[in-house]
Image (tube, grey):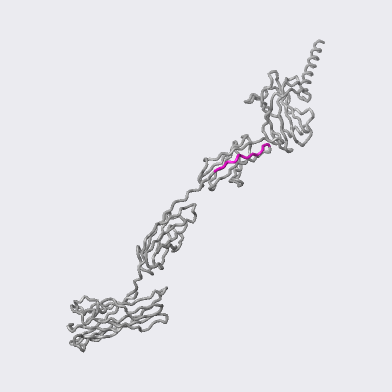
Amino acid sequence: MLKNRVSRALALGVAAVTAAFAAGLAGASAAYAAPIGTIEINPATGADTSGIAFTTSGACPANATNVLVKVEGSGFPAGGLNVVGNSPITTYPTAPNGGMVIPLTSTMRDYASQAGFTTLQGKYDFTVICRTAFNGTSLGDYTGAVWFTSNTTYQNTDPAVKTGTTTALAVTPAGPAQAGTPVTLTATVAPAGAGGTVQFKDGASNLGTAVTVVGGTAALTTSNLAAGTHDLTAVFSPASASYNGSTSAHVSYAVTAVPAAATTTALAVSPASTAPQFSPVTLTGTVTPAGAAGAVKFTDTAGGTTATLGTVPVANGTAVLTTSSLPVGAHSFTAVFVPADAGAFTGSDSGAIPYTVGAFTGVTASETITTTVNAGALVISVANPQVTLPSPVLNADGDLLTTAGSINPVTLTDTRAGNPGWTISGQVTDFSDGATHAINGQNLGWSPKLVDKAPAQTVTAGSAVTAAHGAGTGDAGTAGLKSARTLANGAGLGTAHVTADLALNVPTSTVAGTYSATLTLTAI
């Protein structure tokens, strides 16, 4: 009988314990205490099917032995749903901060299904209740929450409350920097956990593409900042709607232009120093460095006036100009390099090169005049193109041998621009027999004549030149054609023909023989 009573009493006792434990599991009516800390919810964002773990900000009170975790919110019972049953504290590992790490036994989707609904929405509050195994009264609570921004995704921050951010911008190297120098813009975003991108800007223009923030910083290096003052900013765009964007303070940054590269210009003139009028003169400008783009302006200072001869593009470091129109007189040439981009290269000049253009020296032609003196008479015989005079004969006074004839007609054609006019002159050498005997060239005279001319020409025959009266070979005078004499003067373009009658006086002492002299005709 006693035995049965004990057994019954024990049975009742177990039933009482069991009932108490079940009440602890239900927990809907458990009394809450004031919160003693918070819950860190991991992961911070996730899906309705993600595993979730809590890390409390501290340990439960010393007299607590167990914990119970509830969730409350849309769809769950008014008193909440236990998501972690009444469990010994020792079940859970201790976090570095001294708190407990408590994983949920299932997912939010499972808890919703258990509570009989399908749409997760809005805020869900979690409470970690520190308690004893058999007493439903809380000894202290840790609280936290998640917000479902869709039926399937959550975050551990209130989407209606955004976290402010700040963005600071640093630029290296410190300005001013020379154009083309790599410049690095570094944005520092706080708080460091705010993910997103930074768009670096120069005024209203973007510098490159947006840069992802890593560990609270984003950096961009560019070498494309042009010379001038730049207004640099960094604009942070958060990846999460939980954060506000921010823009850095404006940084004024100066970029200086790359100094223009110095150049040198040298001038060479060919032919050197001097040239006759109407002949080509070549000016060559050499620019260093050879890659300098631009042109060389050639100038000529003459008679106190400076004129541009021409401007020639530089190719492979040189520019060449040739002219045949320089007037007679003193000149001073320069070569001036004019860069295509004054910001890339400086201009330079060669300095003055003095030059002289001489008078036009004309052209020359010659004829050989031959006569043969026979025994007792003077005879001249020549073959074309030579001029052959008859053999000299004794004059009426008996003191000279004389002969006469004509030079072959001289043709002069003038087609020069500007109608400069012309003069034909002639000068003869002494006559020689090829040995030791001679007839002084003074003894040859002439009477110039005009044969014909072009209608536009004005031609005047030169004055007659009287032959010397038998000048000897030792006579150093300048009579006759021994000195240069004018055959004709002319102006106007076209062709004229002139000739001259010749008269030769031969001393009677002249040894018989064939004598020749050269008559040089010069046109100028």
Q: Is residue 16 left or right of residue 97?
A: right
Give x and y (percent) for residue 136: 76, 21
- Asked if residue 520 is positioned above or below residue 288 in the image, the reply reads below
Residue 356 in the magenta stretch? The answer is: no
Q: Residue at x 67, y 33 (%)?
A: 44
Residue 302 shows up from this direction:
no
Which portion, as a residue range, is magenta?
A: 242-253
* Residue at the limit of the structure toward the top, as seen here: 2
* Residue at the limit of the structure toward the right, as seen here: 1
Residue 394 or residue 293, whichever sits in front: 394
Give x and y (percent) for residue 479: 25, 78
Residue 324 figure quarter: bottom left
- Asked if residue 305 is positioned above or below residue 44 in the image, the reply reads below
- Asked if residue 226 is positioned above or below residue 50 in the image, the reply reads below
Give x and y (percent) for residue 61: 69, 20
Residue 450 or residue 209, whichever sits in front: 450
Residue 115 shows up from this direction:
yes
Question: What is the quadrant of the C terminus in the image?
Answer: bottom left
Q: Is residue 226 left or right of residue 317?
A: right
